[in-house]
Image (cartoon, helix red, strand yellow):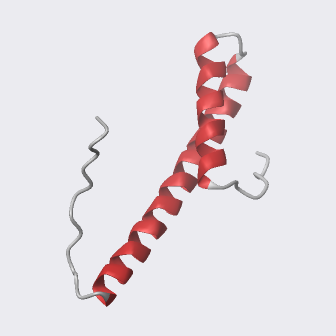
Amino acid sequence: MVKNPKLPSLEISLAEINTLIEKMEKGDLSLEDSLTQFERGITLIKHAQKILQTAEQKVQILMKGNGEEKLAPYENNDE
C-alpha cells in the first residue's frame, strides 16, 4: 500500500471526492483501480471529517469564551 502525500484543504478534498465519484460511476475503471480510488476517497472523507470536527471544536471554544455555552442548530434560509 502506498502512503498518501500531504492531505489537501477541505475544499480541495471535497472536489477530489466528487471527481473520484464521477470516475467510479462511469464504470470504466478496472477492479484494482476502483479499489484504489475508493481507498483514496475514504482517506479524503476521514480527513474532511477531521477538519470539520476541529472547526466545530474551535467554534465551541469561542462560544464558551463569549458566555454562550450552547450552539444553536444551523438554519439555511436559502432552501
Please say if 60 is above or below 12.
below
- In this rendered view, identify the residue nearer to me: 44 or 29: 44
Please say if 3 is above or below 70.
above
Please say if 48 is above or below 35.
below
Residue at image point 24% right, 69% down: 71
The quarter in which the C terminus is drawn is top left
- The location of residue 18, given as percent across then percent down, is 59, 31
- In this rendered view, identify the residue nearer to me: 45 or 33: 45
- In this rendered view, identify the residue nearer to me: 43 or 77: 77
Task: State the image quarter where residue 38 is shown.
Answer: top right
- The location of residue 30, given as percent across then percent down, is 72, 15
Residue at image point 66% right, 37% down: 16
Is residue 72 shown left or right of residue 21?
A: left
Residue at image point 73% right, 24% down: 33
Residue at image point 26% right, 43% down: 77
Please say if 35 is above or below 51.
above
